[in-house]
Image (cartoon, rainbow, N blue to C red):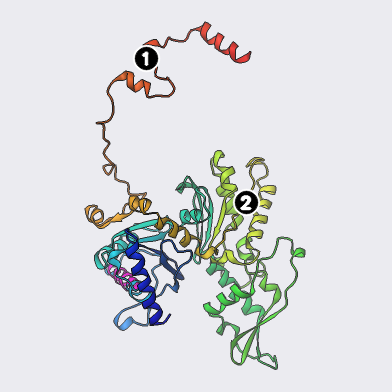
Amino acid sequence: MSKTGHSAMAKLRSIDKIVRSAPDTLILDIGTLHTKLGFDGDSAPRFIIPTRIHGRGLERDKILKIFPYKPSSEPNSARELELALYDMFSDLFYNHYQINPREYRVLILESVFNPSPLKESIAKCLFLSYQVHSILFFPHSIACLHSVGQEEGLVIDIGHTGTRITPISCSIVLLSLCRDIPGFGGEYMLNWLRFNLSKQASLVKVGTLERVDKKVEDVLTQEFLEDVRCRMCAVRCIDETRTPPDAHLNVPTDPSLLLCVPGELRHRVAECLFSIYPEEIDGFPLDLLPERTLSQEIAECFLKLPIDLRVPLSGNIVLAGGPTMLPGFKKRIMEEINLIFSKEHEGKLGSKVVFSIHMPIIHENILGWHGGSVVGACTQAFDARALKREQFVKKGWKVPDWCQLDPTDRPKLDYSRTSTNPQSSYSSRPGLRGMDPSQHKPATKDSISAFFNKLIT
């Protein structure tokens, strides 16, 4: 966007700020590959940028990775993380948002498995360096459900570095039933695609289509593989006869070379997620092969659910993440779930369980951000759960987390409005209908038999 466009957007935000009494909310979804940022109430992110942070000084050309966060025992690791976060937020606030962050609230979408040191470093950077109004760390899985207008369901988030299966009931994450599968996501699919292209694809010249004696691995960069997967690949059905064969495609790698992608490979890019040992694994690293398939992980999560939650959660399955946008992915995963419960786990869920996947009106890769935009627009709900600077300092620079509950940090109850009259306390209970306790007679054998005879007749 040009400087004129940035200045015009900043003027519009300032005018909107005058109209609205409450401060605006910045919605941030910081992922492993991309960061999505925008304002509350927007239907889509304003910017989607790569999550890349460069080093400082002599290490300017070095790209640092924050997500996934890996704690280190080195003494300077925490300081390096804070400096990297400072540079990242400086680029977001001043180069993309073009705002003064002091007047804004910040909603950060996170995973429930994110470690507390990372959240504390983010909060310390935002409060001390940028002095934001307040911060809310909101679970990404709950935001995906809010985006489709539900409070309970099963969220299957297939990210770049892993897959998370999160059951949610009444907007509460059932932590004991969550399934976190690291290394089982988009990066695993790209490695599988790279392995197959290096064996089956070939390089040809433009125009003559003559083969070139050059290694295919030299052109298989991550950006090139992502482009091939997004634009040319799909997911086939379980029954291969129902999937029509695709023709070979020639993908330009440079002005003089083309990469010939086999048509059969274009429909098998996601087979690594649905089979334990995909075809032709000779030469594929064994440490990258998963122990279980995606359908087996989903089935195990459903079998561990309480009986009263199986029906509502089976009818509210939400898929999120970039790999789920492949054509045919939703249909294939429904076939896999129905197949595994009709063969391996037949009759274990009951006859009333019917699986259904939501079809959101927005893309799955921004589903969580869209739900965060909805939450950020609710001012009262945000302020009730947000963390302010005074609270952060009072808690000793700690972010309250579900695994660090403080029993002394509870709201004080006001008993001044509570009546001490026992008769009034009984009258407030709907079961006794305002009767005096002295009027209640103990039950006898005759009264009990008369009561049951009345029910029968």
Badge 1 density bin: few <14, some 14–19, many ≥20, Cα 10 Å: few
> Does residue 328 appear in the picture of this structure?
yes
Q: Nearer the viewer, residue 437 or 171?
A: 437
84 part of magenta stretch = yes
Label 2 – label 1 distance at C-alpha: 52 Å
395 part of magenta stretch = no
Image location of residue 153, percent across then percent down: 53, 49
Q: Kindly state the secondary structure of the residue where label 2 is placed.
A: loop
Residue type at mark 1 is Asp
Residue 55, picture quadrant: bottom left
Q: Residue at x 63, y 60 (%)?
A: 330
Residue 221 higher or lower than 38, as above or below = below
Please give the count of numbered marks on the rendered protein: 2
Image location of residue 357, percent across then percent down: 61, 54
> Does residue 53 appear in the picture of this structure?
no
User: Mark 1 = which residue?
Assistant: 436
Q: Nearer the viewer, mark 2 or mark 1?
A: 1
Q: Nearer the viewer, residue 247 or 58?
A: 247
Residue 398 higher or lower than 125, as above or below = above
Q: Which residues are magenta?
A: 77-89
Name the residue at the right extreme. Answer: 241
Q: Residue at x 55, y 42 (%)?
A: 309
Magenta residues, dominant SS class: helix
Residue type at mark 2 is Ser
Image location of residue 127, percent across then percent down: 26, 63
